Amino acid sequence: MLSDAQKRLFARHVLLDQLGAAGQARLCDAQAVPAAQSDVRAAEVALDYLARAGVQVGAAVAAADITAGAMVAVADVTAGAAVAAGEITAGAASVSADGAPHQVITGSAAAVSLLAGDPALLECAAWLSGAFAAVETIKQIAGVGTPARLDPELVLTGEVI
């Protein structure tokens, strides 16, 4: 159940048919941590988006405090949701059956580098990977939408289309 303050803060979310009050309550009750192999920059973006959606990211892994040493892995993940280190896919979120925090899987540093295609685009690739991971985690927590993955063939370019 959402408090009056949460109803005011997340009023736009509650109005969405896909989310509603029940979905927002699930977001507010959820906790998330970045997967151990996550790119630090991408994890920072993902946790920022998740916190803004109402997900509790915890002081130890708050977006402003992320360092490589602060990454936390959740040992108990649902079958089939794990992503290998270095894999380009992002956004696979997993939930422990015992209520442990959701594990937010962004791309690894190597995967973000592959996505960037050019060192000048590393920051853009980290933002894309982190935002995508946040959206996929929100969808899973709220129980809406269909899981998606970044296309492994996707490579950013400096071209203006």
Image (cartoon, grey):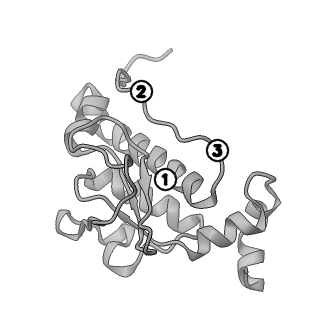
Q: Quadrant of the N terminus?
A: bottom right
**Residue type at the position of mark 1:** Ala
Helix, strand or loop at label 2? It is loop
**64 vs 91, nearest the viewer:** 91
Q: In terms of secondary structure, where does tag 1 sit?
A: helix
Q: Nearer the viewer, mark 3 or mark 2?
A: 3
Q: Is residue 143 above or below residue 147?
A: below
Give neighbour class at mark 1: few <14, some 14-19, many 20+ (Cα, 10 Å): many
Number of labelled discs? Answer: 3
The CA distance from mark 3 to mark 2 is 18 Å
Label 1 belongs to which residue?
A: 134
Amino acid at dot 2: Asp
Q: Quadrant of residue 35?
A: bottom left
Q: Which residue is mark 2?
A: 151
> Which residue sits at x=37%, y=25%?
156
Q: Determine which of the numbered discs, if any, sits on residue 145 in the image.
A: 3
Spatial CA span between label 1 and label 3? 13 Å
Describe residue 26's horizontal placement relative to residue 4 as left or right: left
Q: Amino acid at mark 3?
A: Gly
